[in-house]
Amino acid sequence: IVEKISISIEQTASKSVPVDVIFENDLPTNYFRASYFVKPNSITIVGPKGSLDRISKIILSTISLKDTKESFTRTLKMP
């Protein structure tokens, strides 16, 4: 008995993509988000070229601004 096996191969590639967060909920009345920054603001990802072509940025997390009245720093893990 002869079995047929298909093997797909793909070239490995790397690219730099921006890193960002998503904010949800509004700040309390009379407060506004003046600015924010993510550090690092970009990372290099490595993988199959076809997969990398579908990735335009990395979203770390969703951060709620509900009831926030002071500036803050948060440490987030890469997905």
Image (cartoon, rainbow, N blue to C red):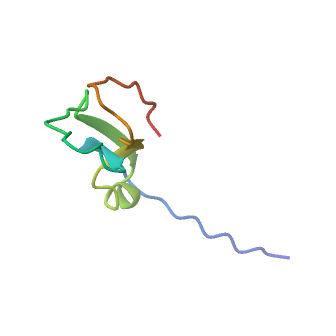
Residue 77: give x, y in percent of width and height. 46, 31
Residue 44: give x, y in percent of width and height. 29, 37
- What's the residue at 67%, 69% (across, down)? 5
Residue 45: give x, y in percent of width and height. 34, 40
Quarter of the picture containing the N terminus is bottom right
Q: Is residue 17 left or right of residue 2?
A: left
Quarter occupied by residue 10: bottom left
- What's the residue at 36%, 50% (across, down)? 24
Residue 47: give x, y in percent of width and height. 41, 47
- What's the residue at 20%, 39% (across, down)? 31
- How many tags in the picture? 0
In front: 5, or 66?
Answer: 66
Quarter occupied by residue 14: top left
State whether residue 41 is above or below residue 27: above
Q: Is residue 5 left or right of residue 28?
A: right
In front: 43, or 52?
Answer: 43
- What's the residue at 25%, 27% (across, down)? 39
